Image (spheres, helix red, strand yellow):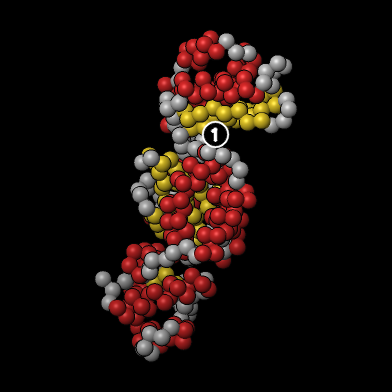
Amino acid sequence: MLDERKRRVLQAIINDYISTAEPIGSRTIARKYNLGVSPATIRNEMSDLEMLGYLEQPHTSSGRIPSAKGYRFYVDCLLAPHSISDKEACLIQQWYEAKVRRIDELFQETAKVLSKITNNISLVMAPQASESKFKYLQFLPLDDHRVIAVVVTNQGLMENKVIDIPEGTTYDDLQHIAVRVNNRLAGLDFKQIKFSIMDEIKQDLLADSAIMQYAFDTVNQAMNQDKSEKVYLGGTTHLLNQPEFQDVDKIKNILSMLEEEKLLCDILHMRDNDGVIVTIGQENKYSGIQDCSVVQATYRIEGQVVGTVAILGPTRMEYGKTMAILEFMHTHLGELIKKYQLK
């Protein structure tokens, strides 16, 4: 364990480095932070912290920068609890109100607003369709001749298909079809929905065969979706603005990883714990992001894990702010999913 003075010096160095991205010298710490000791004493403490592995010295004549071990101690022991600001909460609320009209837009817009607030890359893993239950089929009027057939799952996923309304079919006829389908299928796992069940519904309704086929095609699409989760990215260009990633080869490796959706799912599945989890530097499994930190939160609906929200950025990220934002999203994303399911 570090004594109080070493903790204060380490905290001051990390706070300053997060702000400036420049190696920190003892005179800078003495001038900017009221630690009550001389630059020489701070220099000795920095030397000790380097020897203990909490700091690194990039060049012989330069100041120190935090190591991964230093960041880990900072996150676990030094970081005071943060709360999302009223301005940030308002921005998130206004973003959803302006950008989201349907449940399928929620996850993509979540990625965008998180990257905007944190100035880092955001990753949002949407619920896995293969584990979903059928919730309802709905027909939404598009114009006088077309409707959108929508299938919604208990986890908020939505499959939709534009349908031409057959001549002689009214909107009330479509609503009648939807009610009968929902009464038969609601609450069933998609793997429990067999073609024989849908044939029974079709025979029971004796409805227009074309409109029934379109409706069942939409259900089938939801049933047969790829079993891998969908990952939405936001703000991939933010890394280009970070001084740590001016090396072209380094940034190319990261950007190429971000193109592999299965790899991103593996990264987001590494820790499905409750609450906010921080992995720093080489704690990350994949070498391409071992110069980065990942802050993530797994969220649930009705006790079931349905996805993950994460921020990926340099190890010199604003951990307090990032963790507070993900705590906020961890609490509210389930509520947002339920809200937009009802629209």
Q: Toward the viewer: 105 or 44? A: 105
**Residue 282: x, y in percent?**
40, 56
Residue closer to the observer: 279 or 138:
138
Q: Which residue is mark 1?
A: 158
The quarter of the rendered structure image containing the C terminus is: top right
Q: Is residue 331 above or below residue 62?
A: above
Question: How many C-alpha atoms fall within 10 Å of the one at disc 1: few (<14), some, or many (≥20)?
Answer: many
Relative placement, left or right, of 105 versus 69 is: right
Displayed quadrant of residue 250: bottom right
Question: Residue most toward the bottom?
Answer: 38
In the shown orientation, is residue 100 left or right of residue 224?
A: right
Q: Relative to the observer, which residue lies in front, 207 or 114?
A: 207
* Residue at figure coordinates x 51%, y 43% from the top left: 339
Amino acid tagged 1: Met
Report whether residue 197 is seen: yes
Q: Inspect this view and state whether residue 315 appears.
A: no
Number of marks: 1
Residue pictured at 38% horizontal, 66% vertical: 81
Say above or below: 257 vs 180: below
Q: Position of residue 205 (x, y in %)?
A: 55, 13
Residue 306 in the image: x percent, y percent? 43, 40
Residue 266 sits in quarter? top left
Please name the residue shown 52% across and 32% down the image: 152
Q: Regarding mark 1 in the picture, which secondary structure is present there?
A: strand
Residue under the point 59% across and 55% down: 94
**Quadrant where the N terminus is found in the figure:** bottom left
Q: Position of residue 332 (x, y in %)?
A: 46, 51
